[in-house]
Image: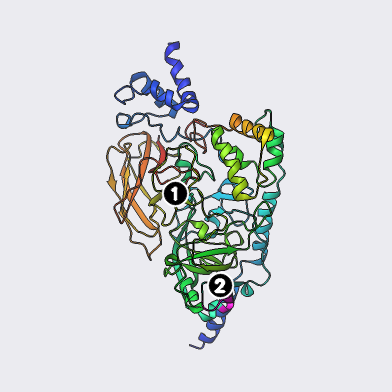
């Protein structure tokens, strides 16, 4: 019974400690996330072709190329996404020849594909 | 002899490049795989297919129905090897076999960001949350004050990305190509949002909410995301302002020092780095509201067609779904294995799960699994059972949950929409015996 006050103190200490993740780990995770976001990509990570430089330059202003590389859309859907990004995500609207070259590139190299987005056959490696 | 070798090579290539044509070539008119083609399919998969006679026509085996590239994995201190969906914004999915814990630990919690991850704050207990709008008295309280003034509750709550299952849609829908792994079921501690709302005095005009957090948009223009819900969900006993996860501080990646948890509804409502909730008399108009965002068609639309979402409705309770967590997709087991104990979890948004079934013969027959009751409302449920494997070879375990209203996971993703919400088709794990 004499231990109870000590237990209560220990509990209180625990309670205050659990409101903050180990400060160092919290900061390191935030920094790790920032480092991932700031990772410099090479343009060559995208498929080679006319319009690649324009696509790489314009799109990676906001997001990295993972969003492009995972995608498999028709030209019409890519075109629609240009409007969506302008309307919903503050992208400078794309128009004219520049828009055409970007959408053409995306549709040509990141068009519908036969297989899904995930790994290969686990039994064929 | 040369002719017989040809299909062994081409069948994989055909499935990879043009599955419709491959099906036309491979599957007979009766939908049965025929002699040489069956042998070729078995060779392609590396094993005999014991239940080949039951494979429906037009079905690509799970082991083949995958992408051409291997997934990449996250490497971050304090996080497991999650499937990387993208670095900017940072998004990562928990592989199903890492979802075996009844309470999802921090390292296995999926990562979903719309914008930038904020830096750690120096004094978490001083973090302030404001409630304003259609209330009698706007209030602003620190975490310390919230904890002192309101009842603190702890609940196991599912929190799932609104786009979980998106990769099931065909044609592809825009967004992270999640499998089933954008789901978590941590033990959350916090205060009920409704208690705080009542303290502020909710007016009769209060019909909706608008949530705000501290993360910024990738374009540096405004907030990353700001979504809202009907006031009824805000007043649900399980909608919490949380400041602890699994008895510890909320990890930075998951919204420290305080976040909303709105269980069973799209995860984007569970605002991370939560700072403010507006009570509104009309639907919120923040980023992530309206159009096709977190909205689904009422009148089904043609898959792949253009639509501005004007007559869609906001996605609310998430659809029934299940994971198989005891065995990874692609597990190889010793020759002679004739039975397997399997388990996983199932959940159904605001509802519960009534039944869990598995099939090892491509849906020809289904076997009921044992299903536990949830420890509390809005928690996922454990399922488990034993399956028989009559021979060595290639099997797929199909698993299907049924919600408390009797709705089952469908065979294919239903109600296609441009941004891909609500896909909950039956999942398939491929295993190889011998």
Q: Secondary structure at mark 1?
A: loop
Hey, which quadrant is residue B243 in on the image?
bottom right
Callout 2 and callout 1 share a chain: yes
- State which quarter of the image contains the C terminus of chain B: top left
Q: Residue at x 65, y 50 (%)?
A: A90
Q: Which mark is residue B88?
A: none
- The image position of residue A94, as x and y in percent, is 66, 40
Bin the neighbour count of mark 2 within 10 Å (Cα to Cα): few under 14, some 14-19, many 20 and up.
Answer: many
Q: Residue at x 39, y 48 (%)?
A: B298
Bin the neighbour count of mark 1 within 10 Å (Cα to Cα): few under 14, some 14-19, many 20 and up.
Answer: some
- The image position of residue B355, as x and y in percent, is 30, 53
Taking depth in this image into account, of A28 and A76 the one nearest to the observer is A76
The residue at which mark 1 appears reads as B311
> Which of the two labelled residues, at mark 2 and mark 1, occupies the earlier sequence position?
2
**Stretch in magenta:** B136-145
Q: Is residue B194 above or below residue A39?
A: below
Taking depth in this image into account, of B81 and B68 the one nearest to the observer is B68
The residue at which mark 2 appears reads as B132
């Amino acid at each position: 019974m004499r231990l109870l006050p000590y237990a209560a103190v220990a509990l209180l200490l625990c309670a205050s400690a659990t409101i903050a993740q180990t400060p160092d780990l919290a900061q390191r995770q935030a920094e790790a996330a920032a480092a991932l976001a700031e990772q410099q990509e090479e343009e060559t990570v995208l498929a080679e072709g006319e319009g690649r430089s324009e696509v790489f330059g314009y799109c990676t202003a906001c997001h990295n190329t993972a969003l492009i590389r995972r995608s498999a859309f028709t030209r019409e859907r890519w075109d629609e996404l240009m409007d969506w990004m302008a309307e919903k995500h503050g992208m400078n609207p794309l128009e004219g020849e520049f828009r055409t070259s970007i959408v053409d590139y995306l549709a040509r190299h990141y068009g519908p594909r036969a297989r899904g987005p995930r790994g290969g056959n686990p039994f064929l490696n | 002899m040369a002719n017989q070798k040809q299909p062994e090579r081409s069948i994989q290539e055909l499935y990879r490049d043009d599955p419709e044509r491959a099906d036309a070539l491979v599957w007979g008119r009766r939908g049965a795989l025929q002699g040489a083609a069956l042998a070729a399919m078995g060779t392609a998969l590396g094993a005999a297919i014991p239940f080949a006679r039951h494979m429906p026509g037009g079905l690509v085996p799970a082991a083949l129905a995958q992408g051409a590239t291997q997934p990449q994995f996250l490497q971050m201190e304090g996080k497991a090897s999650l499937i990387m969906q993208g670095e900017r914004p940072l998004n990562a999915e928990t592989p199903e076999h890492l979802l075996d814990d009844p309470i999802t630990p921090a390292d296995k919690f999926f990562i979903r960001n719309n914008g930038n991850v904020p830096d750690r704050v120096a004094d978490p207990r001083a973090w302030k949350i404001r409630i304003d709008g259609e209330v009698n008295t706007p209030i602003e309280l620190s975490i310390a004050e919230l904890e002192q003034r309101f009842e603190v509750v702890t609940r196991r709550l599912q929190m799932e990305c609104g786009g979980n299952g998106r990769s099931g849609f065909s044609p592809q829908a825009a967004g992270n190509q999640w499998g089933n792994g954008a789901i978590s079921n941590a033990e959350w501690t916090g205060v009920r949002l409704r208690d705080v709302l009542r303290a502020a005095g909710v007016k009769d005009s209060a019909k909706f909410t608008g949530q705000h957090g501290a993360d910024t948009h990738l374009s540096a223009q405004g907030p990353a995301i700001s979504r809202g819900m009907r006031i009824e969900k805000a007043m649900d006993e399980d909608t919490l302002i949380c400041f602890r996860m699994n008895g510890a501080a909320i990890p930075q990646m998951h919204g420290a020092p305080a976040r909303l948890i709105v269980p069973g509804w799209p995860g984007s409502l569970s605002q991370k780095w939560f700072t403010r909730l507006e009570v509104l008399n009309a639907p919120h108009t923040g980023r992530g509201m309206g159009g096709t965002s977190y909205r689904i068609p009422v009148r089904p639309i043609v898959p792949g067609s253009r639509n501005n979402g004007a007559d869609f409705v906001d996605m609310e309770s998430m659809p029934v779904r299940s994971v198989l967590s005891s065995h990874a997709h692609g597990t190889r087991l010793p020759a002679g294995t004739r039975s397997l104990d399997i388990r996983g979890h199932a959940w159904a948004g605001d509802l519960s799960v009534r039944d869990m079934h598995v099939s090892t013969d491509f849906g020809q027959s289904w076997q009921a699994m044992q299903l536990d009751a949830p420890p509390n409302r809005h928690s996922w449920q454990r399922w488990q059972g034993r399956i028989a494997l009559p021979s060595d070879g290639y099997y797929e375990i199909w698993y299907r949950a049924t919600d408390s209203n009797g709705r089952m996971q469908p065979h294919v993703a239903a109600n296609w929409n441009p941004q891909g919400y609500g896909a909950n088709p039956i999942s398939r794990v491929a295993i190889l015996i011998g």
